[in-house]
């Protein structure tokens, strides 16, 4: 397992386990076994959010609650780099963002209670609220970080200009900067139809350059591009489900698929080695967040955790 050192002394694994379905769609026994195998393989980063699967009946907070019970029962809180997100609620699958200080205070308290802990390693704002002054949000985030005893703070689905403005304000006033940025990032070329959700963001050149220059760690969600490359290698592009074709089947991604297949054939590695290595071996410091629906999928990920993808291969994929 590869790691990034955090300011609180903990090691952030470059593979992070997303547990959005735990407590709702994933059976408890399977979820617990996934967590055990992930920790046994050296994984440390567990990522959740207050509003995950809120669109399921009584789903709000269930991922945090399951994780809190599991950590308490297994006595493993200090082995985990615990990351959660706040500031968002759902009406169905429609997101409502509230980054008011009082709203965030309430959510943080609820998250700590659900997770059965008195501190967080990472706390992220799950969406931006562009109509709210960034200065107000930064001031609120400082208070939250202190109240939640957060090792690191960050944002998810924020555009680069807002991250830059937030950190400029923090620097002028001697406040803690945004250290982590969670966004869509994978070896797939992004298209606007991937999510049909204007409140999400993806890795672009401006964000990448900013994160490199300022030492921000990128938490890459959907780091495996919904399994597009692995599935295309296994069954061919004609065998992909329609939604995956709609989201991923572009000329750019077909070129990257061709390069991936050629490299795997020559290097004797797996498609998952390349897909995860694109993030975990990237010059841009990042961790690949993965969500798995079976132990087999998790084992495939863990088998690729140590793979080092050569820099020239990453550059060639980017050029495609």
Image: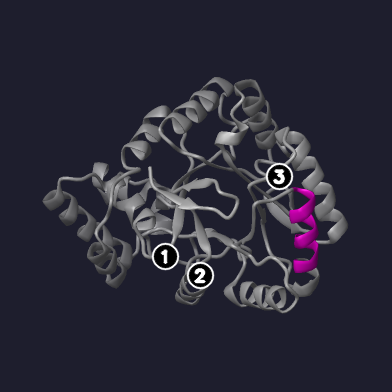
Q: Marks 2 and 1: in contact by CB < 8 Å?
A: yes
| Residue 145 part of the magenta segment | yes
Q: Residue at image x 75%, y 76%?
A: 173
Q: Marks 3 and 1: in contact by CB < 8 Å?
A: no
* Residue 131 visible in the snapshot: no
Quadrant the N terminus occupies: top left
> Which callout, 1 or 2, points at the residue further toward the start of the chain?
2
Q: Which residue is at the front of the view, 281 or 102? A: 281
Q: Which residue is at the front of the view, 225 or 40? A: 40
Residue 122 vertical position relative to residue 208 in the rendered view, above or below = above
- Residue depth check, mark 1 versus mark 3: number of the one nearer the observer: 1
The residue to which callout 3 is attached is 50
Q: Which stretch did the figure color magenta?
A: 138-148
- Residue depth check, mark 2 versus mark 3: number of the one nearer the observer: 2
Q: Residue at image x 25%, y 47%?
A: 233
Q: Position of residue 172 (x, y in %)?
A: 72, 79
Q: Position of residue 203 (x, y in %)?
A: 48, 67
The residue to which callout 2 is attached is 211
The residue to which callout 1 is attached is 284
* Residue 308 visible in the snapshot: yes
Q: Residue at image x 53%, y 72%?
A: 214
Q: Quadrant of residue 127?
A: bottom right
Q: CA distance from mark 1 to mark 3?
A: 28 Å
Residue 61 vertical position relative to residue 192 in the rendered view, above or below = above
Name the side, left or right, on which 170 lies relative to 219: right
> Which callout, 2 or 3, points at the residue further toward the start of the chain?
3
The colouring scheme, among rainbow, by chain, secondary structure or one colour, is: one colour
Q: Which residue is at the front of the view, 161 or 78? A: 78
Q: Which residue is at the front of the view, 276 or 151? A: 151
């Amino acid at each position: 397992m590869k790691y990034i050192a955090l300011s609180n002394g903990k090691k952030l694994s470059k593979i992070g386990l997303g547990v959005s379905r735990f407590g709702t769609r994933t059976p408890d026994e399977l979820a617990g076994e996934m967590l055990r195998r992930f920790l046994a393989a050296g994984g440390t980063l567990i990522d959740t959010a207050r509003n995950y699967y809120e669109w399921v009946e009584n789903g709000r907070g269930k991922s945090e609650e399951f994780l809190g019970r599991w950590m308490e029962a297994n006595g493993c809180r200090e082995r985990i780099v615990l990351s959660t997100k706040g500031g968002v609620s759902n009406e169905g699958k429609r997101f409502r963002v509230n980054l008011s200080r009082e709203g965030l205070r309430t959510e943080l308290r609820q998250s700590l209670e659900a997770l059965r802990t008195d501190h967080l390693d990472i706390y992220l704002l799950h969406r931006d609220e562009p109509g709210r002054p960034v200065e107000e949000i930064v001031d609120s985030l400082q208070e939250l970080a202190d109240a939640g005893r957060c090792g690191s703070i960050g944002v998810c689905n924020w555009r680069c200009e807002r991250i830059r403005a937030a950190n400029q304000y923090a620097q002028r006033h001697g406040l803690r900067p945004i250290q982590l940025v969670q966004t869509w990032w994978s070896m797939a070329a992004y298209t606007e139809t991937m999510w049909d959700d204007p409140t999400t963001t993806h890795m672009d050149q401006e964000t990448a350059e900013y994160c490199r220059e300022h030492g921000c760690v990128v938490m890459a969600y959907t780091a495996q591009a919904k399994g597009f490359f692995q599935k295309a290698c296994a069954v061919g592009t004609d065998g992909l489900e329609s939604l995956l074709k709609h989201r991923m089947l572009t000329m750019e991604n077909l070129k990257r698929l061709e390069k991936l297949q050629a490299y795997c054939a020559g290097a004797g590695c797996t498609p998952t080695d390349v897909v995860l290595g694109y993030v975990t071996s990237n010059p841009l410091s990042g961790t690949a967040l993965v969500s798995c629906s079976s132990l087999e999928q998790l084992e495939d990920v863990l088998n690729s955790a140590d793979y080092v993808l050569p820099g020239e291969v990453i550059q060639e994929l980017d050029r495609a």
